[in-house]
Image (cartoon, grey):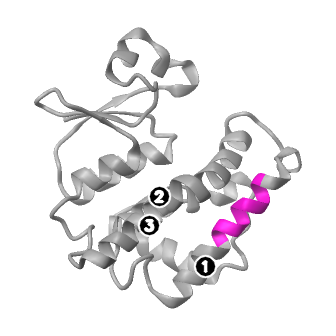
Amino acid sequence: MKIYGDTNSGNCLKVKWVCDRLALPYTWISVDTLKGETRTTEFLRLNGAGQVPTVVFDDGRVLAQSNAIIRYLARGSDLIPADDFAAAKMDEWLFWEQYSHEPYVAVCRFQMVYLGKAASDLDPDKIKRGYFALARMEHQLALTPFMVGNAVTLADVALLAYTRLAHQGGFHLDGYASIRRWITEAERALGLAPVR
């Protein structure tokens, strides 16, 4: 399969991490979103939404949206709980990540790292909602080692992508001991080098 992605994107890295963790063969095709490479006629033929990650399977089928991709790639693996209710809880976190975490934590990071904004220039509502998301994670991770119980799942993959980089978006994790512990353990479980 071919993965069209930008390594600056946590959403793209989710797909890479799942493939690496499950030893799924792939070819990574770099797409620079900041240079508008997702807006070319050629790319828009693959994904009319003009977004990465986009995966093209060997049979020509195309799949987009990071959490849909990782959910498909990980079917039958230990990254999806065998218990149906636990799998549904994992899905709950996957949906929540895209709606209540990524739009705040990732967007603030993007604005600081790629648009050069100062933390003081960020939308206060985005900061507030980002901290609300982090507080919800902290609460869960004080109860369980990973987002859904005792083992790493796709919920951890999805939430790790931008939480481990939250400091780059002006979010301080000093008061989030459970999140800091979880980042270390999730990185270890996925074979990732720690972020500095």
Q: Quick one: 46 or 122, which is closer to the camera?
A: 46
Residue 7's tag is none
Q: Residue at x 25, y 60 (%)?
A: 21
- Kind of residue at badge 3: Glu
Above/below status of 185 relative to 112 = below
The residue carrying pointer 1 sits among few (fewer than 14), some (14 to 19) or many (20 or more) residues within 10 Å by Cα, namely: many
Asked if marks 2 and 3 touch (Cβ < 8 Å), the reply is yes
Q: Which residue is mark 3?
A: 92
Q: Is residue 34 left or right of residue 149?
A: right
Q: Which residue is mark 1?
A: 138
Q: Quadrant of residue 134?
A: bottom right
Residue 127 on the magenta span: yes
Q: Quick one: 29 or 148, which is closer to the camera?
A: 148
The residue at the far right in this view is: 120
Residue 194 on the magenta span: no
Element type where label 3 sits in the image: helix
Above/below status of 135 relative to 2 = below
Element type where label 2 sits in the image: helix
- Gap in Å between the C-alphas at discs 3 and 1? 16 Å
Q: Quadrant of residue 167?
A: bottom right
Q: Which residue is mark 2?
A: 95
